[in-house]
Amino acid sequence: MGQVEIATPRDRSGTFDPELVGKRERVLNDELDRKILGLYGLGLSYADISTHIREIYGVETNDAVINAVTNTVIEDLRAWQTRALEPVYPIVWMDAAFFKIKHQER
């Protein structure tokens, strides 16, 4: 249709704030981030996660986006891996068998 002039409201003093995603904001959608972390926790590869998110939500993701989301839990993961362990962990194992018996009384 012709040329379109776009005026980007940016200035040198840094007063421009984006409306869709705020400055230094990385989370687009908390639910989507939780889904990515859940799929990653299940052992899916980045490619599998990207395919799943695209099929279910119609959102295109790449390895950089998935990596940024999974990196948010690295500090918690390292803390959990290096936590002090208890000297004893009691384990209770129960086993049972259930048999239905038809008893005929005469």
Image (tube, rainbow, N blue to C red):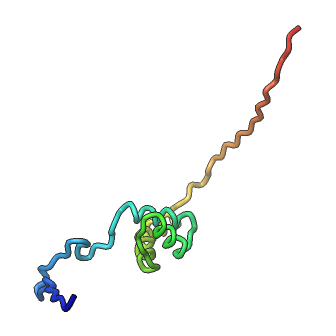
Q: Quadrant of residue 96?
A: top right
Q: Quadrant where the C terminus lies? A: top right
From the top left corner, tell me how far across and down residue 41 is, in percent. Answer: 53, 64
Q: Is residue 87 above or below residue 36?
A: above
From the top left corner, tell me how far across and down residue 56 is, in percent. Answer: 47, 63
Q: Is residue 2 above or below residue 22?
A: below
Question: Residue farthest to the front?
Answer: 1
Q: Nearer the viewer, residue 77 or 52?
A: 52
Can the viewer see residue 79 in this picture?
no
Can the viewer see residue 22 in this picture?
yes
From the top left corner, tell me how far across and down residue 42 is, in percent. Answer: 56, 63
Answer left or right for 25 relative to 32: left
Q: Nearer the viewer, residue 99 or 62?
A: 62
- Residue at 55 percent across and 72 percent down: it is 48
Answer left or right for 80 relative to 101: left
Answer left or right for 21 relative to 37: left
- Residue at 42 percent across and 62 percent down: it is 34
From the top left corner, tell me how far across and down residue 87 is, in percent. Answer: 60, 55
Question: Residue farthest to the bottom?
Answer: 3
Q: Quadrant of residue 3?
A: bottom left
Q: Quadrant of residue 68?
A: bottom left
Q: Nearer the viewer, residue 86 or 80?
A: 80
User: Across the whole image, how many numbered discs are drawn on residues?
Assistant: 0
Q: Quadrant where the N terminus lies? A: bottom left
- Residue at 45 percent across and 76 percent down: it is 67
